[in-house]
Image (spheres, rainbow, N blue to C red):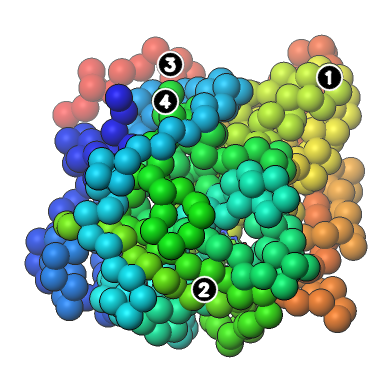
Amino acid sequence: MADQSIRGYLNELEEKGELVRFEKPVDPLENLTAIGWKTYDRLGKASLFTDPVGFPGWRVANQIIADRRKWGIALGVDEQEVVGSFNDRVRSPVPTVEVPSADAPVKQIVARGAEVDLTRVPAVWTSEADPGPYIAAGMAIVKDPDTGIRNMSIHRMQVLGPDRTGYLICPRQALRIYQKYQARNEPMPVAVAVGAHPAIYFASSYTAPYGTDELTVAGALLGEPVRMARCETVDLEVPAEAELVLEGEIPPDETTPEGPFGEGSGGYAMEGRTQIFKVKALTRRSDPIFYAMQCGAPMTDTQALVASAIDMLLWQHLERVEGGLDLIDLRCLGIAGLMAVVVKLRPRVAGQAKTALLAALSGPQMHPKLAIAVDEDIDCTDLRQIFWSLTTRVDAGRDIVKIPNARTWSLDNISDIVPGQSPMYRIGTKWLIDATRPVGTDPAVRERFEPAMPLNLDRIDLADFLP
Ligand SMILES: Cc1cc2nc3c(=O)[nH]c(=O)nc-3n(C[C@H](O)[C@H](O)[C@H](O)COP(=O)(O)O)c2cc1C
Ligand SMILES: [Mn+2]
């Protein structure tokens, strides 16, 4: 039986030297995210804060899934095998199982009605211009009212009082379901789980075909059913080994001023209005770990999580282009605020890289607006090599294509808002850059585009020569 908790994963990170445990007092409303961000930026490590000021009994985790090495630890595979093993596992969804509440650690403490107090949860104040603390790591589980099939997605939640938060719903599957409740003039029941195994987080950021319960995707990644417990006040189930669950509803007709919020784009989402989450019950472990999902300027867990979902989904999408490409690697760049993707492939015929790029700009997720194709000799995790091929292998007149008036991601502030619509609906220019060499067999032509590497580079072991 696999450990489906976040705490089991944090232990593994710590054993592998990937986590810093901060025992000094740190304030979630003052300096926690700065310390966590710097720890990852400078040291490449996750953070666990054991003394969050003002929140006795809690611990707070931050920046825990920001790179492929950590995803490899979560999945128990080598970092090079992460995408391949995700894609293999995703093909066989595993239905959830229900466990009695007595066996669900997330039910160790149950608070209802007036006992609920979100101001006692160490929600963090993340970016400078944010209006206050947010819960950003809540995996919201809802059911389609027609079919009863679950959907799971993450929604940023600005803490607005002891029993209410903002709740932003972008135009995706979760909105499709909410609109069904609105049409019935009924509130949408929702259960929000905070703190679980990264596989469950991955599933919540992954847009499975509509009508697929994303918890079965989490089961596929874990290799066993996700263990679920029944909620106290709504007809929903939640991962039994979560740290914290908020149960409640989204009214069909109420909104609140919300934001601005430092987002996955790396910049701010405009201040506006969102739906409201009214919390009816809070259940948690007796010694809970709050997962402070960091957003804002890269690199954060938000970019890493969404980028990994885009990598998997785009890989599956590109595999079908022209009946099959020689794809070698693919990276949505978190450092570009999720809006750029690099595709490494071996084009078999002229023009094939461009077909691949067109598909990369119209995949299952909306974020990428810039797609770059590179050759098999370029490491597409290395910006130095990418930039080298952007000059030496690109003729801008021929190899850059712009597609104006295309739908772009709702958080792409440089794209225009569709007149009369909310900032969730945008139109802008997508562009692609084919940085692959001319396709052909003439070695003299190929040679002109080779990097001029030092003589016998591969045969040199520096250790033999260092003083
Ligand atoms: C930290 C974080 C915050 C997110 N915030 C929101 C949000 O506020 N609203 C939203 O609609 N999607 C948000 N997302 C993206 C959705 O969770 C994601 O696109 C998901 O796959 C949508 O699922 P669906 O297609 O099943 O609705 C967020 C993702 C992450 C990782
Ligand atoms: Mn979905």
Specify which label sits upstream in the sequence, 4 or 3: 4
Three-letter amino acid code at the position of disc 3: Asp
Q: Position of residue 78 (x, y in %)?
A: 39, 23
Three-letter amino acid code at the position of disc 4: Glu
Q: Which mark is residue 277?
A: 2
CA gap, disc 1 and disc 2? 45 Å
Q: Nearer the viewer, residue 453 or 145?
A: 145
Are the residues flagged by discs 1 and 4 in contact, CB closer than 8 Å? no
Crowding around mark 4 (Cα neighbors within 10 Å: few <14, some 14 to 19, many 20+) is some
Frontmost of labels 1 and 2 is 2
Specify which label sits upstream in the sequence, 3 or 1: 1
Are the residues flagged by discs 1 and 2 in contact, CB closer than 8 Å? no
CA gap, disc 2 and disc 3? 59 Å
Residue at the disc numbered 1: 323
* Above or below, 143 relative to 51: above
* Above or below, 140 relative to 68: below
Specify which label sits upstream in the sequence, 2 or 3: 2
Crowding around mark 1 (Cα neighbors within 10 Å: few <14, some 14 to 19, many 20+) is few
Is 49 left or right of 440, judged from the image as shown?
A: left
Q: Residue at x 82, y 59 (%)?
A: 407
SS label for mark 4: loop
